[in-house]
Image: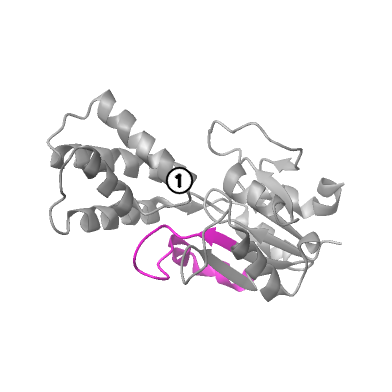
Amino acid sequence: MISAVIFDFGQTLADASDAFRSAEKDAQRRLSEALQLPLREDFVETYRKIRKEFHARSDFSRKAMWEEVYRIWGKTPGEGHLEELEKSYWNKIEEETVLFPEVVDVLGKLRDSYALALITNTQGQKDYGKHRMSRFPELEQFFKVVIVAGEGGIPAKPDRRPFLLCLERLGISPSEAVYVGDDWRIDIRGAMNIGMQPIWLQHRSFRRNWPEAEAPVPTIDGLEKLLELETLLS
């Protein structure tokens, strides 16, 4: 029997899709200018390849990623340049991140029947505890456990440990929890690997090229569908 609903944060409770696109374009432009390279297709293609490699190993540090961009072109960034660029990058995303409109209502109703928790990956910043979810203090009341994986010695999802740590703090087994997330590799496969029931959120409010599901899992296009959880799982 399900006793807990555990959530991812980005693109699950909050929408930052436009913010990330804008921040990435700005970062590419500023890096190409600093490297004295034209912002052409070859630069953008290499940048995206590096970003994909970092994300594949759950390394979300923009500073480390941009250091690799500099290394590829055989150059060294100026002192403080990448730190300032990273700060600007995350500030832009934080300012433009918004909660999905149904979030507060759905969490309030789910709390009546289930324990709620959250597991989100760190943004890769060096400042501990500065995840952008802190911009939404109204969410804190809903969660019994919050895990920011990738900080404080906790490895990032899809590693098993943040999921297991959350379950341990809730005092439940994997079969008693569902995990709601948007990323197949990080969220859905990560939850499946420890025996949790995943629910794949493909929110209707933004466009995305979703990967093929590797296994049948319940899929929803809005969080309000969780209010009929038992029906959804059956």
**Residue occupying image coordinates x 69% and y 52%:** 193
Residue located beneath label 1 in the image = 55
Residue 187 locus on image (x, y percent)? 61, 50
| SS state under label 1 | helix
Q: Is residue 183 visible?
A: no
- Relative height, residue 6 to residue 77 (above, below): below
- Mark 1 residue crowding within 10 angstroms, few (<14) / some (14–19) / many (20+): few
Q: Is residue 127 magenta?
A: yes
Residue 145 locus on image (x, y percent)? 62, 72
Extreme residue toward the top, this view: 41
Position of residue 197 in the picture relative to residue 184 (left or right): right
Query: What's the amino acid at mark 1?
Result: His
**Residue occupying image coordinates x 17% and y 40%:** 74
Q: Is residue 227 magenta?
A: no
Residue 155 locus on image (x, y percent)? 52, 62
Position of residue 214 in the picture relative to residue 21 (left or right): right
- Relative height, residue 58 to residue 140 (above, below): above
**Residue occupying image coordinates x 33% and y 41%:** 24
Q: Is residue 60 visible?
A: yes
Which quadrant of the rendered structure holds the N terminus? Answer: bottom right
Magenta residues, start to end = 119-142
The residue closer to the viewer here, 80 or 139, is 80
Residue 169 locus on image (x, y percent)? 67, 75
- Relative height, residue 140 to residue 15 (above, below): below
Quarter residue 126 falls in = bottom left
**Residue occupying image coordinates x 43% and y 39%:** 52
